[in-house]
Image (cartoon, grey):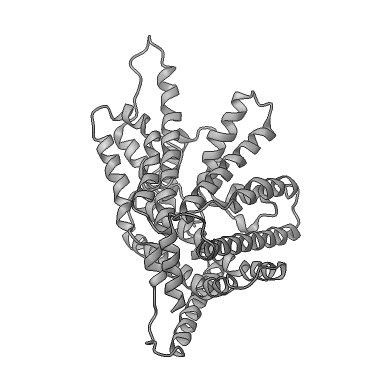
Amino acid sequence: MVSCRLQQVFFHDFSVLYPFCTLSSHIDLFLSYSELFEINHIRTIYHMFISVLFLFIISTLAVGLHRPGKVLVLEFDLLFYAFGKIYTLAVPPLRLVQTLGCPGWFSASCRLPSWGSFPVYVVFHYQLPPASRFIMIFGTGMFGCIRFLMKSYSFIRENVPAILNHNAKEEGPKFPKFSSYLYFLFAPTLIYRESYPRNPKIRWNYVGVTFLKILGCLFYGYFILVRLCVPVFMNNSNTPFSTRTLVLALFHATLPGMLMLLLAFFAFLHCWLNAFAEMLRFADRMFYKDWWNSTSFANYYRTWNVVVHDWLYCYGYRDFLLLSRKKFRTAAMLSVFAVSALVHEYVFTLGFGFFYPVMFCLFAFFGVAFNFTLNDKRKSPVWNIMMWTCLFIGQGVMVCLYCQEWYAQIHCPRTGVCITQTQHIYVETVYAN
């Protein structure tokens, strides 16, 4: 339940930030799902996932106990490898501080989108492993090439037109404050505003517990990989390819794929964004909605990641309609899907170190088809079952094909040295022993 104190803070500033909303939509928008796990029924599901984590730990210990010459201990070599060279994440923010620290910070910030390619240079220069690559390319807050570019575009889009359209007869244009821009870089939002609704205090206990949950999700994902994915796909890479092998591997990957999707949702959209929101006293916690109740993929796309959806709607779909005078709504929607598919494929290509357009095909082709066929006209609970079935299969396809390609890069290398060849060999030697 939202406290009266938060409601007062929220409604004090919200009419200034979002004047197009009605009072009822104010309430609907503010009713965040950040306190969803306070409900007993939801906490029971949360406890079930924790018990599965314990089962993973016990099974890993049991397997290690029966391996000759091995001490009963949990090994996290893959986890340490994936997050290797994590210290390089400090390089882009330091360069950013140097850029903004110079005189004329506003003009410098308007040139910062060109700076967004610098993290890509860091990825290749330091030969980062996969997890560190994903953080550097996507990331959150100031970290991450993609999010920084999106924030920079929003900052320019919201301020430059107002300054250019300023009436010369009036007093000088109102430039944004540096403190507002700096707050926006860290705030869990992609839409720039001069001010945001703020909470009166920070709950540091909540922040600490939330970061511990993120750490637990990392170990959870590690056990999913080492117990459900690595043994299967490492052995499949040594067997001749056949349709039967592919189908079996695909359906074997549906469960770990869906578990990793739920972990990514909980760790990033729930824990990480709420932790930063709490530290910054950011009051609007509507980072996602009840996407699990969706009976259409159109609704799923709108509610899965509200932060990114708002950015795509404001600066992609809505601006396209304004430029076309609201004549090409379908083209506007297709352009948003195209941009989203390209960005996701860009992240996966740099993250894994090879181009394999599985994500692009799922987004640009199947995603578009499901958006128009499984639309908002579908209201029956049967369509919710259909949506979950498609999600399971889609996650299985992604995990199956990307894992197979990873090991194909090891056993069937191309001519020349691959940028991640040493990383692939390292993963193979860790699990071959």
Residue 303 screen position, x and y as percent: 59, 50
Camera-nearest residue between 431 and 398:
431
Camera-nearest residue between 66 and 224:
66
- Using the image, determine if residue 129 lies above or below residue 175: below
Residue 84 screen position, x and y as percent: 35, 62
Residue in the image at 58% along x and 32% along y: 318
User: Which image quarter is the C terminus in?
Assistant: bottom left
Please say whether residue 287 is visible from this viewpoint. no
Camera-nearest residue between 96 and 123:
123
Residue 397 left/right relative to 66? right
Residue in the image at 37% along x and 29% along y: 110
User: Which residue in the rendered view is the most extreme toward the front?
Assistant: 415
Residue in the image at 60% along x and 64% along y: 400
The image quadrant that residue 248 belongs to is: bottom right
Residue 87 left/right relative to 251? left
Please say whether residue 356 is visible from this viewpoint. yes
